[in-house]
Every structure is written in C-alpha cells, then in structure tokens.
C-alpha cells in the first residue's frame, strides 16, 4: 500500500458521530457545569454513538460513564486554566491537519466535507481546534500532577512489595537474548528487474493500452489493483512524500517515470488534482528474489551453522566475518532493539518469522536458515525513508529469561516504574476527589440514578 497511514474506522466513526449530533430529535441543553465549563447533552450523545460504532462495551450505563469521564476532564481543564498552562499549538495543528486530511480523503473533497457536516470548512477548523486545545490543556495538567511524584527509591519498592498482594505483582513475559548471522540477496539485480518491467508497462500505456487494465493485471497493491490502480481523491499528506511530489508534478493523463517508495516501485497517472488533493492510478511492483538467491544464501548459512556446531569457529567470529548486517556484525552478531537499545526481546518485539525459527530452541542452540526482513527502522539517507530488506539468517539463542512474577533482585527497574505509576494514579485520584469537593459543580437530576465511581458527584445534583 502507498498510504502512509491507513484511514481507520475510528476516523469514519468520528465523522458519523459528529454529524449525528446535528440530527437529534430533542432540544439540546446543558446537563452539567464544572466551574465555568459546560457539558451539553449533545456532547454525551455524540460520544455514546462513537463508542457504540467502535464496538466498545460497558458494564455500566454508558451515558453515566461518558458523563463521569467528561466531568473529570473538565476538572483538569479548569485547573489548567487556573495554572495558566499553555496549549502545545504545534501538536494541535498537527492533529487538526491530520483530522481534516482524513475527512477530506474519506468524503472526497472540501465541498463534500462541508455538505456532510453542514458547516463551512473554516467553522469546522474552529470547532476541532477548540477540541484539541482543550485536550492539550487537560493532558498538560495531568502531566503536571504526575511530575510531582519522584522516582521511587529501593526502599519505596521494598515497601510496595511488602504491602501488595503477590497475585497483583506484574508478570514479566519470557524474554530472549539473540545473535544472528545475516546475508542479503542481490538487491541491485532484483531492483533492475522490476524497473525493466515497469518501463515495459509504461511504454505499453504510452502506445495505447489502458493503464487500468495493466494495473489490474500487474499491480501488487491489492487495495487499488482491482479498481484499475485508482486510489481515489485523497490528501497528498497521506502518501509517502516522494509519491505525492511525483503525482502533484504530473499533468492529468501523463505517465510518470518510475518512483521508488518504501513499498516498492511505481508508475503513476494523475486523473484529477484539486488543491492539495489528487486522484491517481498507480502500478506497484516489488523486487522479487529468485529461488537461486535463497538457495545460495541458505547453503552458506547451513555450512556456517555446521562449522559453529562442530567447534571449528565461534558464532561471534563467524558473524564478524560473514554477516552483512552492519549493526550486529560489529557486535559479534548480537541483536538489539533499535528503539530501546535493549538486547532482550519479548515475543511481540520479534519478527514473526524470527520467532518461529527460535521458539522451540534452548539456550545455545542455533536455528536452521530462515528468510526474514530487515525493517528495524534504520534510515536510508539518500532516499530519505526507512528501508525494509529481505534477508536470510541463522539465529542463536544466547539466553532465555522465563516468564515470572516480578522480583526485587531481577526486575527492579520494572517494579520501580510500576510503583511510580501507581503513585501517579493515586495523585490523580486524590486531585480529582479534592477538586470535586471544593469546585462549583452542578449535574442535571436526569443523571441522579447513575452509579458513579466517585461518591463526590452525589452531592452535585441541582434542580437549576
């Protein structure tokens, strides 16, 4: 897929729920006030609609739950204004732009967007910007409260372990320490073969064949190929920049040169452009590696595995000499998480193919050769995007830490974080309860039967 982020159901649901608020068959009114912050019945109903469409369930009255969440958010918002906290406008503008781009893409342009919501775009921007500004202030206030909790000392952690039920201690999942010897196929030859095929298809289109017909036959983008390669009118921001730049530079009906993105290689035909949006067809093709590439790599890796098992060479020496993966080659093959730097991996941090290769191995054992992908987030500076490459490897299990209940000696850092999070949540709860008691809050009696979690709301009902 060429989209940088797929439009999720949540975005669609949000649109539907917001529109539904305009179609309610009752008179909207204020149902709660926290300080100077009001909650409207339409706010509650809109959120209820959204939760239902997302399949979110509740063992409580959902409207009561939504109202209590909103009341708590207003407590934070009110305090944020008192504390003169500032909105992170960069984050707000980023979220606002993303939201508008999603709706423009889903609905098919600015005219459709305004028709769907019954408001001009500038009004929608104002409404959504206000929502994100309030959200930013709420998050800032919560962060401010949590920062008052310092890092936990060993004494704090021991005290926590002495008081907490052992059944409530966190479970540390199984972790693996691994090393690899990694070989890459001939990427240049595979790339060249794809380029030659796309050049042939481009020539056929220029000579009169239909782009849409060839896209159905050859494109490897399953989402668009069945539509003749058509992507639909969408904001340029949801595609890889190099793809968007190429499309926006084209005149309708002109076929692009070959464009490379992290998804593969494309040729593009623009159907329509409007502002920062475009509708285009594309044919995507990905480099394919031959059976000979795989067999050659597997033969080399199998020979290395045999030599290591026979003691002729150490895994570390073989990795340093033969491995083609630079980050692990210089470290004797030892793998590490590129995001955290940790040399230990939980199951969900491993590539599925890597885990399948080592899941039945014991410490010190080496996997059979396996085909995998190199997609560890490293950046190709020349092409300016993250590269994921097919590779072939053998993996040694250096160490296995079985799943276990967290302990002071083995998992201090995790327990330290756990205790601090618990203290932060206590601080948040204490803050809310204190503010409920001292803040001017009114709740409409229509919610009097709600089973709120916080007893303090019970004194806030009013007939006003």
Image: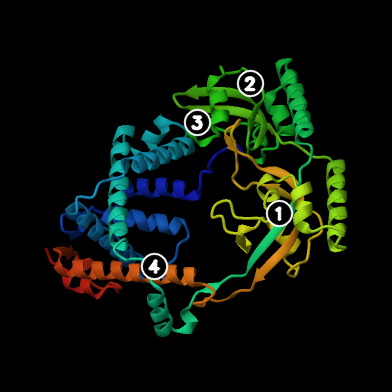
Residue mark closest to the camera, 3 vs 4? 4
In percent of width and height, residue 437 lies at 17, 70
- Cβ–Cβ under 8 Å for marks 1 and 4: no
Q: Is residue 245 left or right of residue 444?
A: right
Q: Answer with the quarter of the image where residue 421 lies.
A: bottom left
Label 4 belongs to which residue?
A: 421
What residue is rendered at 65% in x and 47% in y? 327
Helix, strand, or loop for circle 3? helix
Q: Secondary structure at mark 4?
A: helix
Q: CA distance from mark 3 to mark 2?
A: 16 Å
**Label 3 Cα crowd, 10 Å radius (few <14 / some 14-19 / many 20+):** many
> CA gap, disc 4 to disc 2?
53 Å
| Real-space Cα separation, disc 1 to disc 4, in angstroms | 37 Å
Is 265 on the left-hand or right-hand side of 70? Answer: right
Q: Which residue is mark 1?
A: 332
In the picture of the structure, the residue carrying the numbered disc 3 is: 236
Q: How far apart are labels 2 and 1 at the CA level?
A: 45 Å
Q: Decide: few, some or many residues near mark 2? Use Cα within 10 Å; few <14, some 14-19, many ≥20.
A: some
Residue 405 in the image: x percent, y percent? 54, 78
């Amino acid at each position: 897929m060429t989209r940088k982020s797929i439009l999720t159901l949540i975005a669609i649901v949000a649109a539907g729920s917001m529109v539904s608020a305009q179609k309610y068959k009752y008179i909207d009114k204020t149902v709660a006030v926290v300080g100077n912050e009001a909650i409207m019945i339409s706010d509650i109903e809109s959120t209820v609609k959204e939760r239902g469409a997302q399949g979110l369930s509740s063992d409580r009255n959902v409207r009561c739950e939504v109202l209590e969440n909103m009341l708590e958010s207003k407590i934070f918002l009110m305090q944020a204004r008192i504390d003169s906290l500032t909105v992170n406008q960069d984050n707000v503008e980023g979220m606002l732009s993303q939201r508008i781009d999603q709706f423009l893409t889903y609905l098919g342009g600015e005219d459709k967007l305004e028709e769907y919501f019954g408001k001009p775009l500038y009004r929608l921007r104002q409404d959504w910007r206000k929502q994100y500004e309030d959200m930013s202030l709420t998050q800032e206030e919560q962060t401010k409260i949590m920062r008052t909790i310092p890092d936990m000392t060993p004494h704090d952690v021991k005290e926590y372990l002495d008081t907490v039920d052992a059944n409530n201690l966190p479970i540390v999942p199984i972790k693996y320490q691994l090393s690899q010897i990694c070989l890459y196929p001939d990427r240049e030859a595979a790339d060249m073969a794809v380029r030659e095929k796309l050049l042939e298809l481009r020539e056929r289109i220029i000579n009169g064949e239909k782009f849409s017909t060839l896209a159905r036959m050859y494109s490897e983008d399953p989402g668009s190929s069945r539509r003749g390669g058509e992507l639909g009118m969408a904001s340029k921001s949801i595609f890889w920049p190099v793809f968007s730049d190429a499309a926006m530079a084209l005149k309708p009906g002109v076929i692009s040169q070959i464009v490379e993105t992290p998804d593969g290689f494309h040729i593009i035909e623009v159907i329509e452009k409007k502002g920062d949006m475009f509708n285009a067809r594309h044919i995507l093709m990905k480099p394919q590696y031959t059976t000979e590439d795989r067999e050659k790599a597997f033969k080399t890796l199998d020979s290395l595995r045999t030599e290591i098992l026979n003691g002729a060479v150490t895994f570390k020496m073989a990795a340093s000499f033969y491995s083609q993966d630079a980050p692990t080659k210089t470290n004797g093959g030892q793998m590490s998480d590129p995001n955290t730097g940790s040399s230990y991996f939980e199951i969900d941090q491993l590539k599925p193919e890597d885990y399948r290769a080592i899941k039945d191995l014991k410490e010190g054992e080496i996997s059979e050769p396996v085909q995998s992908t190199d997609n560890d987030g490293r950046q190709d500076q020349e092409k300016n995007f993250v590269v994921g490459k097919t590779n072939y490897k053998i993996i040694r299990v250096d160490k296995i830490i079985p799943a276990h209940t967290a302990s002071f000696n083995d998992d201090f850092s995790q327990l330290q974080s756990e205790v601090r999070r618990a203290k932060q949540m206590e601080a948040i709860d204490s803050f809310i309860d204190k503010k409920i008691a001292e803040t001017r809050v009114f709740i409409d009696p229509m919610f009097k039967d709600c089973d709120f979690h916080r007893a303090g709301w019970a004194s806030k009902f009013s007939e006003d």
